[in-house]
């Protein structure tokens, strides 16, 4: 009979400790949830910065492309002028040399 009393008392103690254990588990789960949200926010912020950097690079590449298109049209017009007149002036040569340097520089960049 004494053993049964001890067993009942242990069960009662265990049942009394369960709410405390449950509360600890809830606190731990809440802490983990908070850490997960913090990590998600950190990755989202990092992704935002990367996206912003990529957009800036894209804007720069678009600008460079527009400049090159302008220079190409200008060179084509000069080429037509030379073909029509048969004369090559010093300014044309300097401009073409400069365009070649810029083109070489941009090709090495990309």
Image (tube, rainbow, N blue to C red):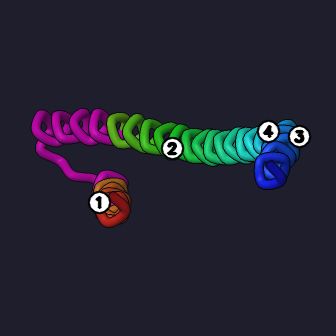
Q: Is residue 39 left or right of residue 26?
A: left
Residue annotated with mark 4: 22
Give the extent of the magenta segment.
Answer: 71-94
Residue annotated with mark 1: 107
> In this picture, is 106 found above or below 22?
below
Q: Look at discs 3 and 2 and give the one toward the viewer.
A: 3
Residue annotated with mark 3: 16
- Total marks drawn? 4
Q: Look at discs 4 and 3 and give the one toward the viewer.
A: 3
CA gap, disc 1 and disc 3: 75 Å
For numbered disc 3, what is the local secondary structure?
helix
Residue 84 appears in which quarter of the rendering? top left
Q: Nearer the viewer, residue 79 or 35?
A: 35
Q: Look at discs 1 and 3 and give the one toward the viewer.
A: 3
In x, y percent, where is residue 108? 31, 66
User: Looking at the image, which residue is at 55% across and 40% down?
Assistant: 51
């Amino acid at each position: 009979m004494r053993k049964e009393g001890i067993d009942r008392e242990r069960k009662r103690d265990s049942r009394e400790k369960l709410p405390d254990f449950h509360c600890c588990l809830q606190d731990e789960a809440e802490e983990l949830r908070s850490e997960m949200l913090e990590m998600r926010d950190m990755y989202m912020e990092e992704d935002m910065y990367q996206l912003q950097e990529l957009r800036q690079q894209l804007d720069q590449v678009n600008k460079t492309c527009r400049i090159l298109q302008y220079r190409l049209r200008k060179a084509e017009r000069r080429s037509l002028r030379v073909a029509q007149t048969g004369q090559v002036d010093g300014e044309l040569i300097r401009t073409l040399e400069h365009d070649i340097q810029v083109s070489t520089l941009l090709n090495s960049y990309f």
